[in-house]
Image: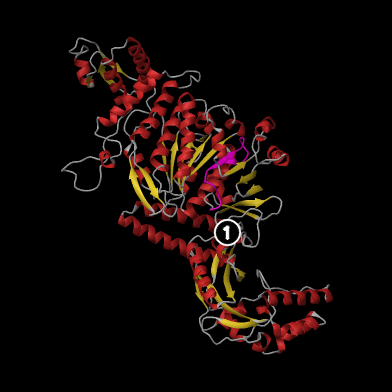
Amino acid sequence: MSGLFNREKQAKEKLVKKNKEKKVKRGLFSRKEHVDNSVQDVVVSAESEEQFKSIFQTRDLKDVFSFKGLNSAPFDHIEFQDGAETVYARTFYVQELPRGANFGMTFSEILNFPNTYSSVKLEPIPDKDATKSLDRDLTSVESEIISASRQGDTNRIRRLRSKYNEGESIVSEIESKQNKFYSFQIITTIYNTDFDALNNATRDLFKAGERNGVTLTSFYGRQLEGFLLNNPYNLKIKQGVIDEFRYKIPYHRVDIRSLSTIFNHIRGDFCHKKGVLIGEHMISNTPVIFDVFDPGHRGYNLTIVGQTRSGKSSFIKKMIKLCAVFYDYKFVALDTQRFGSRGEYADVCESVGGVNVVLGPQSPNRVNFFDISTETIYKKETQEEVERLSLADAVSNIYNVVAALIVGKRTSYELSEVIENVTRNAILSLYLDRGIVDGDVSSLYERSEYISAGRHRKTMPTMSDLYVKLVQQNVEETSQYKMQEYEKLLARVSDYVREVYICHGCGKTYTQQEYEGREVCSCNSRIQAIRGTVLYFDGETSSTVQRLMEDRDVPMLNFDVSGVPDADLELVMMVTSYYIESQFLKRNSLNPLKAQKLVYLSDELHKSFVNKYVRKIIINAYRTAGKANASCWTATQSIKDYFLYKDAKAEENPVTIVTQSTAMFLFNHKQADVEYLQQLDNLNENDIQFIIDAAQGECLLVDTTGKARVRIILLDSELDFANTNVELEKERSRRKA
C-alpha cells in the first residue's frame, strides 16, 4: 500500500501548507490516516479546509470512498486497487477482554501486528455510572464468595476476596477523584496484496489475541462499514447507517491507570510488550512497562539496590501486587525487616491473598533443610520432563548448610578435610538408613499395603539425627586425631540440637523418661542430655509450611524472620533461603511453555554475606532459578554489598548475583558508593551522578535491552500496603480512625 500512503502524504502536506492557520481534525488515537484515490485530486486542489469538509457532506458515501476497482461484495473482506496491485483488507473489532485487562499491555501485540492499522474510540464514563457498575460487580463477587464458602473452596475464596478488595479500592479512588473510567472500542484492519497471506496473517492475529485473552470478531457481511469506521475521517462522513452500526459494536471499560498506557504501541523509551506499569520515563514522560519474564531477557533475575528511604521497598511491594494480581506470579519472600509489629511484606502478602509464616524463637513453625526432593530433566527434542533424584547433589548442598552453621560468624575459621569428610558421610548415611537410594525416585516414598492412594514421602532426617549419627560414627573410630576432630564437630553441632539423650560410649539413644530414670548406660558410660541454644533448625518441617510450599495456587508465601535476634538472623536467612531454593524454585517446570512465573524475593540479603558457605547457597539459588525458568529478586541497601568479597571464588562471590541479573533497579546511593558503581560495566558518569542525586522514588533501570531513568508512580490506594514510613503509617491510621 506504499503508493496510496505516499500519495496521501503529498496531498496532506500541500493542504497543510496552504492552510497554516488552520488545523485538520483527525480521528482519535488513529495511527495512520488514509485518503483514497478518488478524493486525492480534490484534496490537492482544495483552497481551504472548508472546501475539504464540503466534499464529505455533498458527495455520496460510496463515491467518496470508491477506490479504483473497489469490491465490497465478499462477506469476509474487501478488495481495491492500489496502483497496479490488488489489496485485500479484512476488518475486526474487539469482542471480549480478559478480566483485569490493562490497555497498553493487553493490546500491545495486536496494535503492533504487521500490516495492520487500528483505531480506538474513547468516551468518559460519568463517575456516578462508573461506581454503579462497579457496585454491581462487587455484589457479583460477594455472591461468588458465599458460593465458594458453602463448597469449602478456600483457595477460590482467597482469590475472590483479593478481587473484591481491589474493586473497593477503585471505587474509593473514583469517589475521591483520583481515578476515572472510560468506555472504548477497538477496530483493526489487516491488509495484504496476497489473499492466502492475508488468511494466514488473520489466523496469527487471532492467536495473538488469544495469547492476551482478547477475542476478535470479524465484521462479517459488513466489511465495508467496518473498514470505514476504522478510518480517521469517519467523524466527518457520518451517515445514518454508519452511526447506527457503530453502536452495535461492544464497548469496554478501562480506568485511567490502564489508559495512561494507551500510547505504548506507538513508541516508548522503555516498554515491554507485556508487564506492569511501574512509572514514567523522566526524560520523555512516557509510561514505563516492565516485565521480568520478557522473552528478550537472558534469565529473569533482578537486583534492586537503594539506601533507606529511597523508595526501594515501596517499588518492590508495588511489583508484588501488580504481578500477583494481573499476571499470576507466585511469590515466596524472605522478610527480614520489621514494620510495626511484623515483617515489612506482611501487608502486601495478605492484600494478594497470600499467607504469612512467622519463623522465630516463639514460633512453632519450622523448616527442615534436610528435606530433599526430586529434580526435573527436560528433553527439548521430545518436550518430555523426567523426575530425577540426585542424592549426591543433595548431600553436597546440605553439607554447605551444615558447614555454614558450624562456622557461624567465625569468618576466618576453616573446616578441616577430616570434618568435611565425616560430616558428608554422616549426612549420606542418614538417607541410606531410610532406604533412599541415588537415582531411585520411588525410594523417597513409603511402600506399604496400608497406603492405598497417593505418594507419602518418608520422614526426613533432622539436626538431632545428624548429631546421633556423628556420635555413632565416632564410637567406631580408632584414629586419635579423627576422634579429636569428631569432638570439635559434635560441640558445634550440639548448639543446634533441640533435645537428645545419648551415650557417647556406645551411641545408644534414650527418651527423656528413660534418661530421668537412669543416668548411666548399660555400657557403664554416662548418658548425656544434649540441649542446644539455637533451636530454629531442628525438627521436621511444619505441616502448614509443607502444604503451602506444595500448593502452587497460593499467590504469595512470606517467611517473616523479622523477629529473629540479630545474632541468629544470618543463619536463619541462610537455612530458609536454601529451603526455598530446594522446595520452591527447583520444582518449577524446565519446559518454558509449562513453567510457572515463580519469584523468590530476598530483602536485605547483604546481612548474610559474611559467611562464605552462606554466600555459596545464595548464589546457587540464583543459578537454580536460571535453570528452572524462575526469578530471584535480591534487595540490598548499596551496590557496595556485592563487591566486598570480589576476590572470592565465583561460587562464593556475590558479584555473581549482579552479573547474573537480567535487570537492575538502582535507587539513590551515597557519594561513598561511587567507586563501586563505577565497577558496573554498563554505567557511565551521567548514570552514576543521576543515581547519587536521585530523589525518593527515582531510579535507573538497567536491563539487557537498554536503560531508563524512571520515576516510580505510587497511587494513594497502594499506600495501604506499599508505605514504608512508620510515622506516616501511624498518621494514616489515626486519620482513618
Question: Residue 638 falls in which quadrant of the image?
Answer: top right
Residue 440, horizontal then vertical, whole percent: 28, 40
Q: Main secondary structure of the magenta part?
A: loop
Task: Please indicate whether residue 737 sits to the left or right of residue 467 in the image.
Answer: right
Question: Which quadrant does the N terminus fall into?
Answer: bottom right
Q: Could you say which is closer to the camera, residue 81 or residue 561? A: 81
Helix, strand or loop at label 1? It is helix
Residue 456, horizontal then vertical, whole percent: 25, 42
Q: Could you say which is closer to the camera, residue 366 or residue 73? A: 73
Mark 1 lies on residue: 175
Instruction: Tell me which residue sits at (31%, 33%) in the image.
Output: 540
Residue 80, horizontal then vertical, whole percent: 62, 83
Depicted 18 relative to depicted 582: above or below: below
Chosen colour scheme: secondary structure
Residue 230, horizontal then vertical, whole percent: 61, 76
Instruction: Tell me which residue sits at (54%, 73%) in the image.
Output: 197
Instruction: Tell me which residue sits at (49%, 30%) in the image.
Output: 615
Magenta stretch holds residue 311: yes
Depicted 604 relative to depicted 507: above or below: below
**Residue furthest front in the image:** 381
**Residue furthest left in the image:** 449
Depicted 683 relative to depicted 591: above or below: above
Q: Which residues are magenta?
A: 295-312
Instruction: Tell me which residue sits at (39%, 26%) in the image.
Output: 402
Q: Amino acid at mark 1?
A: Glu
Task: Please indicate whether residue 510 sits to the left or right of residue 90 in the image.
Answer: left
Task: Please indicate whether residue 320 sits to the left or right of residue 399 in the image.
Answer: right
Res 646 visible: yes
Magenta stretch holds residue 413: no
Res 638 visible: no
